[in-house]
Image (spheres, grey):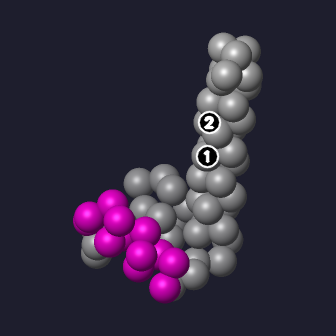
């Protein structure tokens, strides 16, 4: 595997992750999906400590 291909692949993965995170944040702000939000909270590990997400990500 060439180094250039490896760099391109890793950059693509980083961009895909960033875009996915942005889409998830926008979806959570404009239409809060409850099961998805619950899974996200369990993944982060701090359920019931997020009043700022409903107000638009500004505490």
- Mark 1 residue crowding within 10 angstroms, few (<14) / some (14–19) / many (20+): few
Which residue lies under the disc numbered 2? Answer: 14
Is the Cβ of the residue at disc 1 closer than 8 Å to that at disc 2? yes
Q: Is residue 42 magenta?
A: yes
**Residue name at image x 59 percent, y 59 percent:** 25
The location of residue 18, given as percent across then percent down, is 63, 43
In the displayed structure, does residue 49 sit left or right of residue 9? left
Along the viewing direction, whichever of 27 and 9 lies nearer the viewer: 9
Which residue lies under the disc numbered 1? Answer: 17
Along the viewing direction, whichever of 42 and 47 lies nearer the viewer: 42
**Residue name at image x 62 percent, y 36 percent:** 14
**Residue name at image x 73 percent, y 22 percent:** 5
Q: Is residue 41 positioned above or below 15 on the image?
A: below
In the displayed structure, does residue 47 sit left or right of residue 39? left
Q: Is residue 44 positioned above or below 10 on the image?
A: below
Instruction: Choose top left, top right, bottom left or bottom right for residue 41.
Output: bottom left
**Residue name at image x 66 percent, y 68 percent:** 27
Dominant secondary structure of the residues highlighted in magenta in the image: helix
Along the viewing direction, whichever of 32 and 55 lies nearer the viewer: 32
Q: Is residue 16 magenta?
A: no
Give the farthest residue toward the bottom: 35
Q: Secondary structure at mark 2?
A: helix
Instruction: Choose top left, top right, bottom left or bottom right for residue 3.
Output: top right
In the rendered structure, which segment of residues is drawn in magenta? 35-46
Q: On the rendered image, what quadrant is the N terminus found in?
A: top right
Q: Secondary structure at mark 1?
A: helix
In the displayed structure, does residue 33 sit left or right of residue 50? right
Q: Is residue 4 positioned above or below 30 on the image?
A: above
Q: On the rendered image, what quadrant is the C terminus found in?
A: bottom left
């Amino acid at each position: 595997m060439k180094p250039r291909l490896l760099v391109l692949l890793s950059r693509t993965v980083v961009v895909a992750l960033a875009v996915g995170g942005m889409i998830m944040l926008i979806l959570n702000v404009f239409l809060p999906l409850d099961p998805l939000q619950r899974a996200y909270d369990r993944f982060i590990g701090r359920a019931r400590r997020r009043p700022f997400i409903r107000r638009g990500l500004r505490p």
